[in-house]
Image: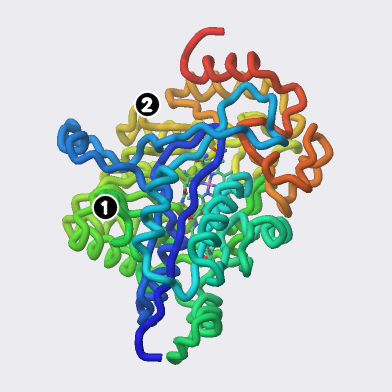
Amino acid sequence: MNHPPTILLINPWIYDFAAHDFFARPLGLLYLAARLLAQGYALRFIDCLERPVDRNIAKNLPSGEHSVTGRYHKEPLPTPRPLRGLPRRYGRYGISEAAFRDKLRGTPWPAAVLVTSLMTYWYPGVQAVIRRLREHFPGVPVVLGGIYATLCPEHARRYSGADLVQTGPGEPQILPLLAELTGWDRPVPPVLEDLDALPYPALHLLAERGLIPLLTSRGCPLNCAYCASKLLQPKFQQRRPAAVVEELTYWQARLGSKEVAFYDDALLINAESHLLAILEGVLSRGLDLRFHTPNGLHLKLISPLVAKWLKKANFSTLRLGLETTALGPKRLDSKVQAGDLEQALAALQEAGFGADEIGVYLLIGLPHQEDTAIVDAIRQVRSLGATPVLAQYSPIPHTALWSEALRVSRYDLESEPLFHNNSIFPCWPEFSWPRYSRLKTLAAGGRV
Ligand code: B12
């Protein structure tokens, strides 16, 4: 074959009650895109979560503000049957149906389509995209991968409509798989263990160029009962700091991006030889960047030295992970002990961060969690001078907490991933909307 085959990549819509672009980019799919480009494939990319970039708005933002987060366009949809009756409005987030069809019409006939997936309970968006692909490109093989595919492969094989459902990291499998599907039989480069040997994710395919979503490591050495990190990336691996600085230098020069969001699950492990070395490199290169950690940091690892560097290097959105402040044998994560919250917040304040810059994630809706534990946690975080951010628990298959989640849930979590939706508090037996609003008001600083 002489002409390189065209591969179409799709980041599907979100179907949910709520969704907000909080530094979200389809980084996994863009890593695969880079591998395909290096192999000579022609690529097309449809990002259903692209937000209209309003140049005028962007131009008028006060200096220092950014537009790399924001609202998705939402179109109301009927609530799927299993979730009917909830006082929330369901919908499709992302580009319109018409825009999606236009993009399909503008795509040359592909040799294969790769679809990614994120939250397990967003699978209706995956199905919707695949249904339209089938109509438009009948007979073209559709491959599904990503987080929903990895955590619920049987469900995905039965219901997604994809021809192939692949689990786990895509880098080792994607080239042999596509060679088989397309007949593009260039020699497949060996899969190296070294993360720095991977080509940079193809961020230039994104419409919005202000943000660099960044992974300096994969996996996590800890083992929290509610988290799927180990299932998705079994091995914890860190990149070389110099290679990360190279990548940031490259993207700033090529795209002019200024904002960086870390996607790492364990950014602060070996902080001195890893993150601090990266930040030192960034400063000595004179890069003009601002950093965000939407995925929570381990607060135990925020020492005065780390805090000082976070300030010096221009960290702006800080989120720390603290399940709750209730300690003791019933605790679900292995990472927080008495005094950790106090010392982390003291270090950050000493370094110059204000209360509104430090968000502390509190997991709510955990099995057996009592309202009083949440109220205490909210009050403690506030009294220590930080901002509580409620993170609703989503039960995840194969995690240590899953069997308990199944036991306490009023929903059939096992057969229907829609019930993993954090917005419905599937594992909070005492849940009621007034109760939740009360906690939200309290977290926002109101009185209840
Ligand atoms: C970064 C991140 C976020 C970001 C946004 C990311 C985004 N792109 O939108 C933020 C911080 C906003 C976020 C928010 C939340 N998140 Co989150 N997040 C992650 C995290 C840490 C990394 C995802 C990622 O980008 N990984 C890096 C890339 C390289 O990996 P990847 O996407 O998996 O892609 C690889 C493979 O899957 C595969 N692949 C991907 N696509 C394809 C396609 C094909 C065809 C093939 C073959 C292979 C393939 O190859 C890729 C390269 O190896 C994961 C945990 C994790 N370790 O994965 C949780 C995770 C996905 N989040 C989770 C949760 C619970 C949430 C929240 C609900 C938390 C909360 N309670 O508020 C919110 C919900 C967000 C919302 N409603 O909008 C859960 C998933 C729950 C579920 N039921 O599915 C996870 C698994 C964490 C956990 N607790 O275990 N999250």
- Counting from the top left corner in percent of width and height, residue 149 is at 62, 59
- Which label sits on residue 338? none
Residue 241 occupies quadrant = bottom left
Left or right of 299: which side holds 78? right
Q: Is mark 1 within 8 Å of ligand 1?
A: no
Is any part of residue 83 visible from this angle?
A: yes
Q: Earlier in the sequence, mark 2 or mark 1?
A: 1
Residue behind mark 2: 356
- Counting from the top left corner in percent of width and height, residue 354 is at 34, 27
Answer above or below: position of 351 versus 193: above
Crowding around mark 2 (Cα neighbors within 10 Å: few <14, some 14 to 19, many 20+) is few
Mark 2 to mark 1 CA distance (whole Å): 26 Å
Q: Quadrant of the N terminus?
A: bottom left
Answer above or below: position of 411 versus 42: above
* Residue at 49% over, 61% down: 136
Task: Give SS at disc 2.
Answer: helix
Question: Which residue type does callout 1 highlight?
Answer: Arg
Question: Which residue type does callout 2 highlight?
Answer: Asp
Crowding around mark 1 (Cα neighbors within 10 Å: few <14, some 14 to 19, many 20+) is some
Answer above or below: position of 162 versus 377: below
